[in-house]
Amino acid sequence: MTIDHVAIWTSKLDKLKDYYVKYFDGKSNEKYLNKERHFESYFISFESGSRLELMQMPGIPQNLNDTVEKQYQGIIHLAFGVENMNMVNEKLTELSHDGFKIIRGPRKTGDGYWEFETLDPDNNRIEVSAIFAE
């Protein structure tokens, strides 16, 4: 069994699509539009086969959780794995250079990964990690 996709509501649909395509090598489908419901979405596909559904529709309330400073129960981050520690460092440099906040890292985790945490344009937490190699 695999996870087919994870869905995110957003008010910045095209900006979020562009972020995952540019920084995480996602491939986007054409925008889906349901004119009756005023619903729009993209599916972003990744090399692993997993997908991210980005959705926008009027009337969806904003998330009231503090996603930057605190964490709450429920799904808290998306994690992207890369091949090695250098790729983690390169992605951190790229995102930081382009103005995205780095919350923590890079660092070695207790379970043997080299990772950092950042935020996407909607302040969803993103991790980028690789197996730590000395």
Image (cartoon, rainbow, N blue to C red):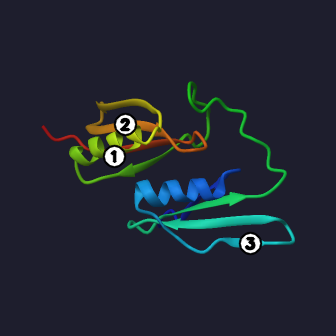
Residue lying at 28% horizontally and 39% vertically, measured from the top left: 113
Q: Counting other residues with Cα less than 10 Å from the Cα at mark 2, is it few (<14), some (14-19), or many (20 or more)? A: many
Image position of 29 with respect to 2: above or below: below
Q: Which residue is mark 1?
A: 91
Q: Is residue 39 left or right of residue 122?
A: right
Specify the quadrant that holds the C terminus. top left
Q: Counting other residues with Cα less than 10 Å from the Cα at mark 1, is it few (<14), some (14-19), or many (20 or more)? A: some
Residue lying at 47% horizontally and 43% vertically, measured from the top left: 126
Q: Is residue 112 left or right of residue 103?
A: left
Provide the secondary structure element on which disc 3 rests.
strand
Instruction: Say what amino acid the circle numbered 1 marks.
Output: Lys
Nearer to us in this view, 35 or 97? 97
Instruction: Say what amino acid the circle numbered 2 marks.
Output: Phe
Pointer 1 or 3: first along the chain:
3
Pointer 2 or 1: first along the chain:
1
Q: CA distance from mark 1 to mark 3?
A: 32 Å
Instruction: Say what amino acid the circle numbered 3 marks.
Output: Leu
Provide the secondary structure element on which disc 1 rests.
helix
**Residue 8: x, y in percent?**
63, 53
Give yes or no for contact between labels 2 and 1 (Cβ–Cβ under 8 Å): yes
Q: Which residue is mark 3?
A: 33
Quarter residue 33 falls in:
bottom right
Give yes or no for contact between labels 1 and 3 (Cβ–Cβ under 8 Å): no
Image position of 78 with respect to 71: above or below: below
Q: CA distance from mark 3 to mark 2?
A: 35 Å
**Residue 32: x, y in percent?**
69, 72
Q: Which residue is mark 2?
A: 116
Provide the secondary structure element on which disc 2 rests.
strand
